Amino acid sequence: MNFFPKFEKGTILRREMLVALRDYPYEFIHILFNKYGDGILSGFTTGITENNDICISKGIAKINGRIYLMKDDFLLKSEEGRHYVFLTVEELDDGDYVQNDLRIITAETEDFSNFELFRYTRNADILEYAKFNDIGSDMANRLNKVACAYSCIGGSSLAPEYFVIFARELLEKNDITGFDYAFATQCLVSAISIELLNNYFVVDVKKISNHELLNLLKEKLISFSARSAQPIKEEKPQPPRQVTIY
């Protein structure tokens, strides 16, 4: 049922009309992402400026089953040393209305009470990961998003950009199966589902951490590299067979 208030000349503005305007957008979004787990739904992409600061785009996140919006881009001044960047929900109540906003905060230590967006260590210019095997390591001057939960159908998983890097390297292998090719294609074109991950790794992904999932992906790439490096056995020519005709 769609319920839209009619604002016409002479109409008395009632409380129910305003409630309808308030609730309809949220109910629509909630139904749309009902099967998705907690994590980043859209946005919060990162980029590095010429001054080595970090640009964080606006986005939508699902935290503790509720959907929140950060409406503006955010410029984070990067600092020397190791830092953690979090999303936190801030509630404002001035008596007339309640406003829930996503705020970005930083700390020098881990804080499991807040939603971690990424972490970085700056000793020089900050860089992004280029090779999949380097993702998640304690390399200096990298944006590390492994601990961040990204929402997908059935739960949450790694950052989509990491799956893209994985897929590109996987497609370079010569001995991948049809399932590997299909999985890599899915990584490139759309979000990954928990069901697909469970079938690809034959493991319950909900019971492992993002770091453990990352290691499974690395092991997958290594296994193909090892098999590709094995020498091909040369077939010895067979002598001609004698055929007797009766």
Image (cartoon, rainbow, N blue to C red):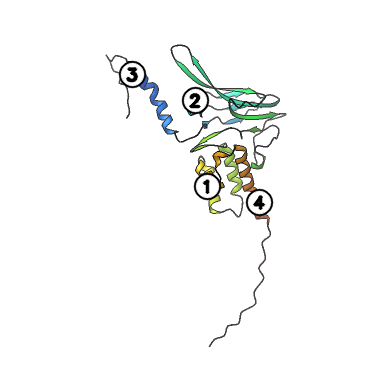
Closest to the camera, between mark 3 and mark 4, is 3
Task: Return the disc, 1 or 2, that comes first in the chain's sequence.
Answer: 2
Between residue 124 and residue 215, name the one nearer to us: 215
- Number of the label disc, if any, that sits on residue 16: 3
> Vertical placement of 160 versus 181: above or below?
above
- Number of the label disc, if any, that sits on residue 69: 2
Q: Position of residue 201 (x, y in %)?
A: 56, 47
Task: Return the disc, 2 or 4, that comes first in the chain's sequence.
Answer: 2
Cβ atoms at labels 1 and 2 below 8 Å apart: no
Element marked by disc 4 = helix
Residue carrying label 4:
225
> Vertical placement of 132 versus 109: above or below?
below
Q: Amino acid at mark 1?
A: Asn
Residue appearing at x 38%, y 25% in the figure: 24
Task: Return the disc, 1 or 3, that comes first in the chain's sequence.
Answer: 3
Residue carrying label 1:
199
Cβ atoms at labels 2 and 4 below 8 Å apart: no
Closest to the camera, between mark 1 and mark 2, is 1
| Cα–Cα gap, marks 1 and 3 | 47 Å
Left or right position of 144 against 20: right
Residue appearing at x 56%, y 54% in the figure: 177
